[in-house]
Image: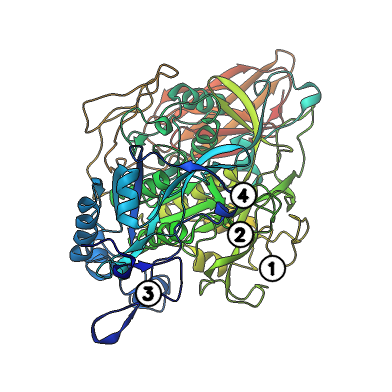
Amino acid sequence: MKRGRSRRISVALACLLALGPYGRVLAAPRPSLSPRIVEATTIRRALRTHHHRIVVSLDLRNRDALEAFLVAVQDPASPRYQQFLSQDEFDALYAPTPQQEEAVVRHLRRHGFRITERYPNRLLVAAVGSVGAVESAFGVEMHDVTVRHRRHYMANREPSFPPDIAPAIVGVIGLDDLVTMRSHVRVPQQAVAPSAVIGASCCHLGPNDLFNFYDNTVLLNGAGETIVIAGAFAWRDSDNTGFNSQWGLPQLPAGSGQVCTGAAGSVGCRFSLQNSIEIALDAEYAHGTAPQARILNYMAASTSLTDFTRMYNRIVIDNPGHVVSTSWGACEATVSVATQQTDDNIVANANAIGQSWLAASGDNGSRDCNARATVDNPANSPHVVGVGGTTPRCSAGLTAASPGCAGYGSETGWSGSGGGVSQLFPRPTFQTGCGVPAGTQRLVPDVALEADTTPGSFVLENGTWFVVGGTSGAAPQWAGLVAQLDQKGGGIGLGNPGARLYGLCGTTALHDITSGSNGDFTAGVGFDLVTGLGSAEASVLLGAAAVTTTSSTSTTTTSVPTTTTTTLVPTTTTTSSSSTSTSVATVPPTTATTVAVARATATRAASDCAQHVLRLEATSTSTPTTLRAFVTASGELIGTLTNNGAGRYSAQLSWPVNPQNVTVRSALGGVTTAGVTAN
């Protein structure tokens, strides 16, 4: 095929369209280059021998029918309600055809690319090739450029395609590196260990405080569920172990682990002193919310948009769990339309097979991008639940004398909570009523949770305690709540819970937050662009009934991730870096074995003030478990009860003062609180 421009369809000019059979107009691909290209200064033409990794994105078929299905599957009046598709069914109905995918593959190979990945849903074709191959395949020139004194690369124009493949293509990801993904963790500061001398730094939140604050007292612990963390960089197993021990949480359940979606040793799959604070926060607080849900850390090979798109699609194809949380993003105004539409297509696929995706809405208020009013991607997707942030105030506590949070007091909209109006995506059908302003564009966020750095939350990373904030703490906690909702519903998946959540507006299941501002917008009654519908009152959101058993149709894993390394399945090659002892590899989709929800009841709690001894007795209806006692007001660990057999537990623990109230938590998720009598 000749390379003349008369044989191509240029996406640089919207007026150039191809006429298909019978004179039908075929849409040209979306813009593939970042809007930041206008900031670039060219240094030189790129060397043709340099190599780039690219992803060609193919569009969904029958999009209108897919959107109608996604509405029906969330409508209790529809016969399709909760009848999610298998991936094979999705591929047959809505994925690009095998012929369309093969035509793209042939085109890339013809111009010298090596195909590195193809996917069952045929939405992406990943390839690597030289600058010469890129220029030949897409009719561009690759340039070395600078943007704000930093070196980058970019194509000099939008890519173009032969008429036989152009109609099926969304665009090309990887023709520039002007934008990368960033985490939404806010300014970590090193802190003294919890329960140590507080001093002037009092006070910060741990998972037990948030358990009390949001009244997560329903006996749902996420058993049988899987929460997938979508991001980059590895955790250290010792951090998970130390964090859980500090707060009396069970260790991560069997089947938890880390999945590298790039080549062995990819930088995004290693532990990083600077960057792993994000996964530490995500994993520790998702687990703190739903302690029996297994946690999988899906890691992109790097923070490039190309690698994140590949990682997103891998999560859909692997389908390892029903709930996905990401605390990474980039501002809508700087990411190419093709990239955002591609990722939205992937998440629409996820919703159709029953996955729920949640994303942090950003930490820069309404000015998400260099003081420019815009929203954050992927929270701007109509197929993702965008999670904003609040400033929490406890009903009592958080003082040097009583450092724990006693319960819900109030919340205001956090100044850093990302929110606004998408200029790219249309408004989903469920985003209506409840004070939602008139318009046709997607609004962000949908819900919120605590995110302010004051008081901030304790996180353990690399053996050091930090206090952090950001919507990246709110998103994984909401993911834990969604996992509990799915557990209550039988574990079949919820898909996009947007319609369910907006249906709860104005009820006691959500705290309507009516004050606070993120810059351009102010929180008010009903929906707002700071906190969305508000935060969760978990005891009402999850309901009073507990699910005591869960079942699984998946193969049960034999890996036990509570040791110092994660079991590697199915590969036999273990990768590690010199900076970490964490092992990473592919973990296959599995579901934890059936677990009964523990129910602990405190039968006696007395304090002998003269001897400084606290006597506790408790019972548990579960199989043998571990019961730990905490000061209810502060969340401080008092000690572990002794198993006396027949479901009875007791302890005599040294404690300097009468704690007034004691909370007993089971390693299997049960919890109860009792008043302490003084002797």
Amino acid carrying mark 2 in the image: Pro
Q: Secondary structure at mark 2?
A: loop
Cα gap from disc 4 to disc 3, whole angstroms: 33 Å
Q: Position of residue 261 (x, y in %)?
A: 34, 39
Q: Residues within 10 Å of mark 4 (few under 14, many from 20)?
A: many
What SS does tag 4 mark?
loop
**Quick one: label 1 or label 3, which is nearer the N terminus?**
3
Lower sequence index among marks 2 and 4: 4
The label on residue 445 is: 2
Which-is-in-front pick, marks 4 and 3? 3
Mark closest to the chain's N terminus, 3 or 2: 3
* Mark toward the viewer: 1 or 3: 3
Where on the picture, by quarter, is residue 350?
Answer: bottom left
Name the residue rendered at 37%, 78% in the picture.
Answer: 78
- Camera-near label (1 vs 2) is 2
Which badge, 4 or 3, is on the more N-terminal residue? 3
Nearer the observer, disc 2 or disc 4?
A: 4
In this figure, which residue is indicated by the disc labeled 4? Answer: 362
Q: Residue furthest top?
A: 611
Sequence order check, earlier mark of 1 and 4: 4
Q: Viewer-proximal residue, 501 or 275?
A: 275
State whether residue 630 is above or below residue 196: below
Cα separation, mark 1 vs mark 3, equals 39 Å
Give the CA separation, mark 3 to mark 2. 31 Å
- Dot 2 crowding, Cα within 10 Å, few <14, some 14–19, many 20+: many
- Badge 4 amino acid: Gly
Residue 172 sits in quarter: bottom left
Circle 1 or circle 4, nearest the eye: 4
Give x and y (percent) for residue 162.
Answer: 28, 66
Q: Earlier in the sequence, mark 1 or mark 2?
A: 2
Please determine whether, in this image, residue 229 is positioned above or below residue 109: above
